[in-house]
Image (tube, rainbow, N blue to C red):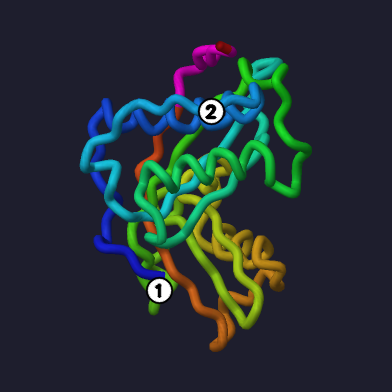
Amino acid sequence: MHQSDSVSPQLTETNRQTLLLIARETIAARLSDREPEYPPVDQALRRRCGAFVTLHTQGHGKMRLRGCIGYLDDSYELADTVRRAAEASAFHDGRFSPLTTDELPVIRIEISVLSAFQKIEDLLQVRPGVDGLFICQGTHSGLLLPQVATTYGWDRVTLLEQTCMKAGLRPNAYKLADTTIQSFTALVFSEEQSPPEASDD
């Protein structure tokens, strides 16, 4: 893993709204079988860094996960990373069926722009609710975004255990010498509670 900075990039409100529009337009265009029409992007969105796009559906007063896929490194410019992650989250997350046109008005899009990854040498460095974790052992790896621990009220040990299980490992695998633990932070933002309906034109 490598990225240019050790902290999440700072983005203006306009930058954030542009990324959210890119994500929604990517999904809407795919569902309508048309070419997407993207807003212009400034230099801040041409920076290379990792990002995740998370989709939730709203109903009965609760938010339900509908897809979450991202890119960990700086292979693409941020705007392109979000575009790719949005399409993958909507149509290629193996845990869910592809998103349908009927669902588009009720999905809420959340974007997490990642910092660089830092190797954890002391488990006391892990800050639940602030740090996301990436745990790797052999061919197994798993990642949890920082906001997951906040959502479920996890402490440090629970976060470590849950990330191990996400990687397909035993919950206590984080204690083993051949397990690598990396942390990262994320700039997280999302659409308003009632997202705009994308045009079908």
| Residue 76 screen position, x and y as percent | 40, 55
Q: Which mark is residue 120?
A: 1
Q: Which residue is mark 2?
A: 35
Q: Which residues are magenta?
A: 191-200
Residue 111 shown in magenta = no
- Tell me the SS state at disc 1: loop
Residue drawn at 41 percent across, 70 percent down:
1
The residue nearer to you, when weighing 47 against 109, is 47
Task: Residue 85: tell me if it is visible.
Answer: yes
Q: Of the residues shown, which amino acid type is indicated by label 2?
A: Glu
- Secondary structure of the magenta portion, mostly? loop
Question: In the figure, is residue 51 to the left or right of 139?
Answer: left
Given residues 41 and 195, the one toward you in this image is: 41
Tell me: 89 left or right of 96.
left
Residue 40: image x %, image y %?
30, 29
Disc 2 from disc 1: Cα separation: 43 Å
Q: Residue furthest front?
A: 35
Q: Residue at x 78, y 38 (%)?
A: 97
Residue 20 badge: none
Which residue shows up at 72% across the image and 17% down it? 102
Could you say which quadrant of the image residue 41 lies in?
top left
